[in-house]
Image (spheres, grey):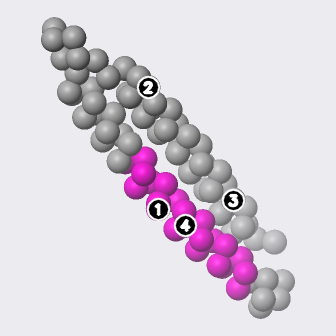
Amino acid sequence: MNVEQDADIEQQVEALAARLAELTERKVATEKRVRALMAAEDHKAGVYYAQEIFEAQQQKLMLETEMEIARRQRNRLTLPQ
């Protein structure tokens, strides 16, 4: 590999690391939202947030999938050639 390719790979790895950090923050916020919604439910009073909880859990799963894809891309770039 030449210097240009190494620099390009480094930029891609840094971009993926930034993407992973952003996705992690979003995942943590989504998990907090799920916990807050579950805590706010009052079954005796008939207050349910099932749809919102379900959507937040789906969002969390999507974020986990995106994180795994970015992690694998980063690992593929850093493998010795």
Is residue 9 rendered to the left or right of residue 71? right
Residue at the spot 47% in from the left edge and 62% down from the top edge: 21
Q: Residue furthest front?
A: 46
Relative to 6, does residue 77 appear above or below in the rendering?
above
Q: Amino acid at mark 1?
A: Ala
Circle 1 — which element?
helix
Instruction: Report the quarter where the N terminus lies.
Output: bottom right
The CA distance from mark 4 to mark 1 is 6 Å
Circle 3 — which element?
helix
The CA distance from mark 1 to mark 3 is 14 Å
Give the label on residue 21, or none.
1
Closer to the chain start, of discs 2 and 1, is 1
Q: Amino acid at mark 4?
A: Ala
The residue to which callout 3 is attached is 73
Foreground: 47 or 1?
A: 47
Q: Is the Cβ of the residue at disc 4 closer than 8 Å to that at disc 1?
A: yes
Closer to the chain start, of discs 3 and 2, is 2
* Classed neighbour count for the residue bearing mark 2: other residues with Cα under 10 Å, few (<14), some (14–19), many (≥20): few
- Give residue 57's position: percent from left, percent from top: 44, 32
Is residue 80 rendered to the left or right of residue 22? right
Q: Which residues are magenta?
A: 7-28
Residue at the spot 59% in from the left edge and 48% down from the top edge: 66
* Classed neighbour count for the residue bearing mark 3: other residues with Cα under 10 Å, few (<14), some (14–19), many (≥20): some
Residue 19 among those drawn in magenta: yes
Circle 4 — which element?
helix
Give the label on residue 17, or none.
4
The residue to which callout 2 is attached is 54
Q: Amino acid at mark 3?
A: Gln
Closer to the chain start, of discs 1 and 3, is 1
